[in-house]
Image (spheres, helix red, strand yellow):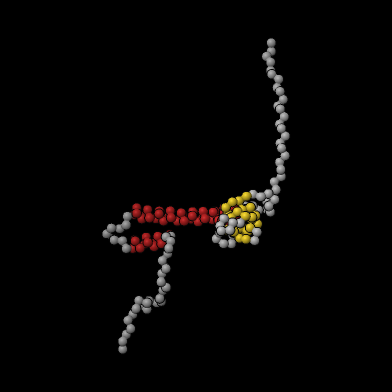
Amino acid sequence: MPIPPIGVATAGAAAQPPRVPKKTLDGEVFLHLLVTQLANQDPSSPMDTNEMIAQTTQLASMEKLNMLSATQDVALGFQQRTAVASLIGTEVTTGGDSPITGIVTGVSFAGNEPQLTIGDQQVSYGNVLSIRQVSGSPGIPDLPETPDAPESPEPPEVPEIGTAA
């Protein structure tokens, strides 16, 4: 009676799915590399502590830069939304194969890039070539005309102070 050989897949409790490598270097990957390096170092020449401190400092710097990048992405999104929303009621001209000129009546932030509504057409914010303020447009109040400022009166003459004789 033959005995089947034990394969790698049958050894152990359960077969685990293949590990998918990460495409970004984050703190978890860095710590995994550091632990692997410490576990496999030569006991007769251990890792220099200054080098280990430098590596952990690099990790902290990398994490802070990632946090800063994420914060800037959020700030850019708010700035872009404010800029695009301020276009409502202005006349824009777009580029592309068939340029469109018209008043922006709405804005949509549903996709990756804001979309402007001009008439019944949706136009990408990145296609806007020129913007022109139009008075009387929906959403833009007409500014009252300012009357000419009255001329300022001449200052009164001040009599000269004489010297007593």
Camera-side residue of 74 and 44: 74
Which residue sits at x=41%, y=56%? 59
Residue in the foreground of this view, choosing between 140 and 161: 140
- Where's the N terminus, which quadrant? bottom left
Given residues 96 and 60, the one toward you in this image is: 96
Residue 152 found in image quarter: top right
Image spot of residue 66 (x, y percent) = 47, 56
Number of numbered discs:
0
Which residue in the rendered view is the most extreme toward the front? 97
Identity of the residue furthest to the top in this view: 165
Q: Residue at x 71, y 36 (%)?
A: 149
Rendered residue at 33%/80% (across/down): 6
Quarter of the rendering occupied by the C terminus? top right
* Residue 81 visible in the snapshot: no
The x, y position of residue 100, in whole percent, is 61, 56
Res. 157 visible in picture:
yes
In this view, the residue in front, 96 or 109, is: 96
Which residue ends up furthest to the left in the rendered image? 44
**140 up-or-down from 25: above or below:** above
- Residue 143: horizontal and vertical position, in percent? 69, 46
Q: Quadrant of residue 37?
A: bottom left
Answer above or below: position of 88 versus 2: above
> Residue 104 lies in what quarter of the image?
bottom right
Tell me residue 95's x, y (percent): 57, 55
Quick check: 83 left or right of 70? right
